Amino acid sequence: MFAYCIIEYPVKTLDKAFTYQIPSDLRNKLKVGMKVLVPFNNRTVHGIVLKITNNYEGDLELKEITSIEDEFLVLNKELLLLGRHLQYLTMCSLITAYQTMLPSALKVKTKVRDYNDYEVLIKLNKPLEEIKEYIKTHRKSNKTQILTELIKKEKLNKKELNYASLRELKQQNIIVEEKIIKKNITEKKIKNDSKTLNDEQKSAYQTIIASLNKTKTFLLYGVTGSGKTLIYINLIKEVIKNKKTALLLVPEISLTEQIVSIFYDNFGSDVAILHSGLSNKEKYEEYIKILNGEVNIVIGTRSAIFAPLTNIGIIIIDEEHSDTYKQDNTPRYHAKDIALKRSEYNKCPLVLGSATPSLESMARASKNVYQLITLKKRANNLPLPQVYIVDMKQELKHRNFIISELLDKKISECLGNHEQIILLLNRRGFSTIITCRNCGFTYKCPYCEISLTYHKTSNTLRCHYCGYTKIKDDICPECHEKALNYMGMGTEKLEEIIKEKYQDAKIIRMDADTTSKKGSHQKIIKAFQNEEYNILIGTQMISKGLDFPKCTLVGVINADSSLNLPDFRSSERTFSLLDQVAGRSGRSTIPGSVIIQTFNPDNKTILAVKKHDYDSFYLEEMKIRKILKYPPYYYLANIKIASKDYNEASSESVKIKKYLEKNLDQTSIILGPSTASNFKRNNIYRFSITIKYRFDKHLMKVLKDLDEIYATNKNCFLELDINPLRI
């Protein structure tokens, strides 16, 4: 018997299956989808079995598979097909596709480590008559007590017994030890306090339920607070009644904590969690629970789309517009594309939920590719929060640089009424640029050529691209004068200003710096929910999905920070961010307010947020996209040409442009080469070429050919991104 295996080898040219002979002792054990160890090029490497056959037509002498790396882990037929689909979508190697699908503890190149907890049991190893004779001939002791108990119970826990007596009995071969895996399942009790669906929710639920057991995609477009989560819960209950499983994706780890507690209340221990905040051991345990079929529901972030669920009855992607569903390193997949494939394979509905759907999803819904379901009202029939726009140009005249007069008044009112406030500033750190007033020196990353961000609590300057860190000095390193000037503002500085201004307030900050430790998201959310704090300051991670009944005010400190970025999606991202964070206010019985501070009060995107008017924003933005030939009217592909040598990257990018012009359809538009938006990162120079296309039958082949050409180039490498979110 023979096996075709792909191997974990860091050379792109070896992206193919190699044939190995299956040794006789493995023939009854080896299965397609198993991890194995195989000999390759005078070393032993990890691999995955893709096919087992009785026939081999070649004439080479084949090497044998060394061993099965993990008998328990078997990629099923769907996951094996999904890996090939991922390879096609992203043009990564097949082994990379399978690596991406597995949690870190089980990756192909990872040496198998046993994360299980074991219980050691003791049992008899001789016939009962011999044991009884032994008890008779030995005086009463710990040994005879153990044997007497074993006759009654058959097995005893080693931890509860006398070790010296056990050692003697074991040496005499009277007893043996048996190791069993201990189930570490914490039982979660179901709370029977489920809410009933209102008329809008019921209509949405019934529309989706009618398509169970069919491949169909729904866009559930509901205003913030319209009760999309309650619809998800009812859909999943129906799916489980039908003996099927459910997969729910959320965009942020911070969201996972709150939504998980809601699902525990409704489904008890029938839920597994998968996200990057878990330890390797926790990921392993959750993955094994899913693989064993011990749970029917999986909740997680982007990578949970590869969860080894079988017989899936529904897939739900909450906040479907979120950028976090797209992976920004190889393989650059979008969870939505994988979800569509799994929906097709399992013949089940896919539900995309959002208060601010992506333009691509809404365009598909308008063409009936997706079925649009709209929730126009909040679940409790309360009004959406009142949005006020403050012109910061006028505020500067009154020396209100950070907090406007209106926001100051509203914060004071909320604090007086014992209500809660959320302040959004989508930039972490204390200061974004440090320059010298005397000589003009600016602190920059030596590897990326971008300004270092100052973090006051650790007194460090950090590069948010490559992670370079250095301790800040009070003296300019160029002119040695004490003349450093702190420009720009992040959440850390805002926290300091708010603490000084509202001394009675209890303030907590939630950003990448305060949530780096395990469990910190949950801790901050729970503390704010329990009203231990009345002001929450944070970046975009506080804008989506969170529900705080006592929060009646949201303040946006600098609404222009994302609006002015040189990106065709900047208006869409800004609308989504502002509308989503506005939705955190007034979700209970007390009406809410939102104050947006901006230097562009007449901007159409900001005015649309004021009216909670996604439809007008969508129509306006679609006009611009059509004129400029951007998605959803055109597809995009992006090629980054990277090298440690600036001239090499530049000259190769020109060659690639010529190659594309020669081989692509004339209808495709080729932009560039130009320097990439993050031009120098980790001492690597990057140029960018963007292709706009509608129907180019040659594109995928041309990109694959380019990828193969540069696979062996040691001085220059390509990064390919199909349908990038940023260019």
Image (cartoon, helix red, strand yellow):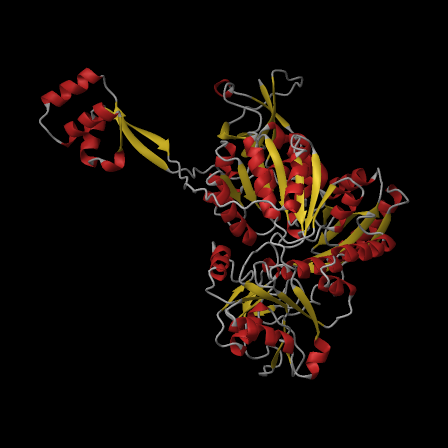
Left/right placement of residue 195 relative to residue 702 reads left
In percent of width and height, residue 157 lies at 27, 33
Residue 297 drawn above or below residue 632: above
The answer, for residue 686, to whether it is visible in the render is yes
In percent of width and height, residue 88 lies at 72, 36
- Residue nearest the viewer, comparing 614 with 333: 614
The quadrant in which the N terminus is found is top right
Count of picture labels: 0
Residue 114 falls in image quadrant = top left
Left/right placement of residue 417 relative to residue 617 reads left
Left/right placement of residue 596 relative to residue 689 reads left
Residue at 63% from the left image edge and 16% from the top image edge: 55
Direction left: furthest residue:
139
Residue 424 falls in image quadrant = bottom right
Residue at 52% from the left image edge and 39% from the top image edge: 110
Residue 625 drawn above or below residue 496: above
The answer, for residue 87, to whether it is visible in the render is no
The quadrant in which the C terminus is found is bottom right
In percent of width and height, residue 314 lies at 62, 36
In percent of width and height, residue 310 lies at 57, 31
Residue 109 falls in image quadrant = top right
